[in-house]
Amino acid sequence: MTKYRGRIAPSPTGYLHIGHAITFWRAQKRAEQNGGTLILRVEDLDAARCRPEFRDAIIEDLGWFGLRWDEGPDAGGNFWPYLQSERRALYLAAWKKLRDAALIYPCSCSRQDVLQSAGAPHHENQEPVYSGTCRPPEGTVSDFDSPAGRHWRFRVPDGEAVQFVDNRLGPQRAIAALDFGDFIVWRKDDVPAYQLAVAVDDAAMQITEVVRGADLLLSTFRQLLVYRALSLIAPEFYHTELITDSAGIRLAKRNASLSLRELRNGGAIPEQLRARYLR
């Protein structure tokens, strides 16, 4: 039986808030309950938004909150490096494999173009189904030898039901090209997109279960297609409930008053915070 390997994967684009900490705490507990290993991976691909002080704060603030990990940038491990910014070669190899298999294609559409061409309403935080403006005939292999300078979209199998069993929510199902469309795996500014990078890294680090917020549920269907396309073993998933503010809105890094750094500086006690937010 494969030994349990879980992970927490914060991004240093701001100070982490209590919602992040609670999700990571649940990930830690899942690893403990399964007698496994917990990995810290810092997702710092977006150089324009990621800052060194936020990266340092991740380790400081999560340590203050009570998180402990077995592998990571500060702890070492057999799956080094634990910073995504140092793992580009892996993402580029995956991009080439998808390109050669005609599973991705270059796209010149901006986010605004996609929003304007959407034929159906969508959630404000969810990109609508891509209309296919730049989608070439099936089987077309691009002759670009570099991903830089254009978006690259993954061609989803139209009408296919993508299914998995979530370890908290039970059976989940979505229809490709209906519930989600062709999605970006590499950005125009030459940055690997979340959907590609996280799948490549979780497979490479042999993660057996991903614990993350329920707001990323739709991303799981996309990533399952990436795993399959790259012949990688997908982990299991456990999507937790989200922590919300007093108005019922999920927390974001702009909620400075609920950042771990602000709570810590204000004299909050981690044990009391966990008792308050863990339900």
Image: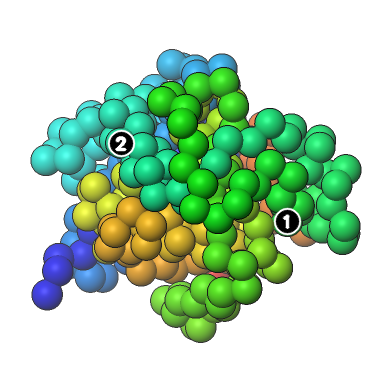
Q: Position of residue 186 (x, y in %)?
A: 51, 35
Q: Is mark 1 on a helix, strand or loop?
A: loop
Left or right placement of residue 235 versus residue 130 in this view? left
Please tell me which residue is depicted at 14% across the width and 69% down the height of the picture.
2
Name which residue type carries label 2: Ala
**Mark 2 packing: few (<14 Cα in 10 Å), some, or many (20+)?**
few
**Mark 1 packing: few (<14 Cα in 10 Å), some, or many (20+)?**
many
Between 51 and 104, the one lying in front of the other is: 104
In the image, is residue 59 above or below residue 125? Answer: above
Name which residue type carries label 1: Val
Quarter-of-image position of residue 30:
bottom left
Which quadrant would the C terminus be assigned to in this image?
A: bottom right
Q: Where is residue 173 in the image (x, y as percent from the top left)?
A: 57, 78
Left or right placement of residue 94 versus residue 219 in this view? left
Left or right placement of residue 185 versus residue 131 in this view? left
Please tell me which residue is depicted at 30% across the width and 36% down the height of the picture.
93
For marks 2 and 1, the one nearer the N-term is 2
- The residue pinned by badge 1 equals 129
Q: Position of residue 16 (x, y in %)?
A: 53, 36
Residue 52 visible in the snapshot: yes
Between 93 and 244, the one lying in front of the other is: 93
- The residue pinned by badge 2 equals 93
Quarter-of-image position of residue 158:
bottom right
